[in-house]
Structure formats: C-alpha cells, structure tokens
Image: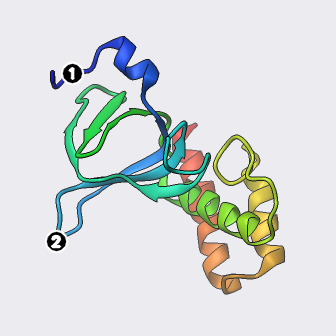
Amino acid sequence: MSEVPTETDLAAAPLLRGWVLESPSYSRPWLYGWFFGHPEIDEGDHSHTSPVLHMDTGTPARWARTDSRLYRLGETYPPAEREIRYWAQKLRRRRHLPLGEAPGGGNDIDAMIAFIREEKPLREQKLTRMEHGYRAEQNRIR
C-alpha cells in the first residue's frame, strides 16, 4: 500500500472535521475530531482514530492514514472554538436534539455559547473564559 493515497482513495475515505492531532505520552499520536461517512461511527460523533501511521505534510493537511483506515481531513478549529463546539454537541446529544451538519449544531458560535450558558454544564467563569478565548481567536484570524 502506497503511503500517499490516490484521489479515488480519498474520495472513498471518511471525513474528519474539526480535527486535532494529540500525542499522549503512552501511545503513538492519534486524531480527535468529528466523524462523517465512517462505517462504524455515527454521523457527526466526536471520537478519536486509531494511531496515526502517516499524515499529509501539506498545508493544510488533506489526509491521514491510521492503523485501521484512511481519513480525509476537513477544516480544523482554533482551540476555544473547538471546545465550544464540543460542549454544544455534547449537550445537544444529552437533550436528544439534532446534531446538525457542522460540529456543535451549525456555524453560529454565538448561538452555541448561549445554548451552553442556558444548559449550565460549566461554571460561568469557565464558559466566560471560553467565550473570551473564542473572541481573541477570531480577532487574530481577521
């Protein structure tokens, strides 16, 4: 098997959105993110891959091959936005609400922050830090 996948291989591969490469001290690195088109993981679920064997070195990275399969890599999110999306989706799942096409239920981060605030799973201080972190990320991106 070639290290670099073909376009046909990529087109058939599950999509990982909002991904981040994690390197636990006890294991090889793996990817955390939201899965789409995976044969064994529900659509839009947040989870992690098996250990990464090879990863595209381009910017942005387009693919990763793990112990178990090839993944297409979609967009990444800055850390605070990623955490907001994670909590919004976790709470949506708890309330049996539709997950939406984008992680967290959509692309309206302000609505996600309001939803998290209303559900109160976190201390207000932590949510305020996440919100300020998100605003700072957005200012750096612009």
- Give the image location of residue 48, x and y in percent: 40, 56
Residue at the spot 36% in from the left edge and 27% down from the top edge = 62
Q: Quarter holding the C terminus? A: top right
Question: At numbered mark 1, what does the secondary structure look like: helix, strand or loop?
Answer: loop
Give the farthest residue toward the bottom: 123
Residue 92 circle label: none
Mark found first going from the N terminus, 1 or 2? 1
Residue 26 circle label: 2
Residue 4 circle label: 1
- Give the image location of residue 7, x and y in percent: 36, 12
Q: Quarter holding the N terminus? A: top left
From the viewer's perspective, is residue 19 above or below residue 11? below
Q: Is residue 91 left or right of residue 44?
A: right
Closest to the observer: 93 or 112? Answer: 93
Q: Alpha carbon of mark 1 to alpha carbon of mark 2: how far? A: 27 Å
Q: Amino acid at mark 2?
A: Tyr
Closest to the observer: 83 or 99? Answer: 99
Q: Is residue 81 left or right of residue 120?
A: left
Question: At numbered mark 2, what does the secondary structure look like: helix, strand or loop?
Answer: loop
- Give the image location of residue 31, x and y in percent: 35, 51
From the viewer's perspective, is residue 3 above or below residue 35? above
Is residue 131 at least partly visible in the picture? yes
Residue at the spot 23% in from the left edge and 60% down from the top edge = 23
Q: Residues within 10 Å of mark 2 (few under 14, many from 20)?
A: few
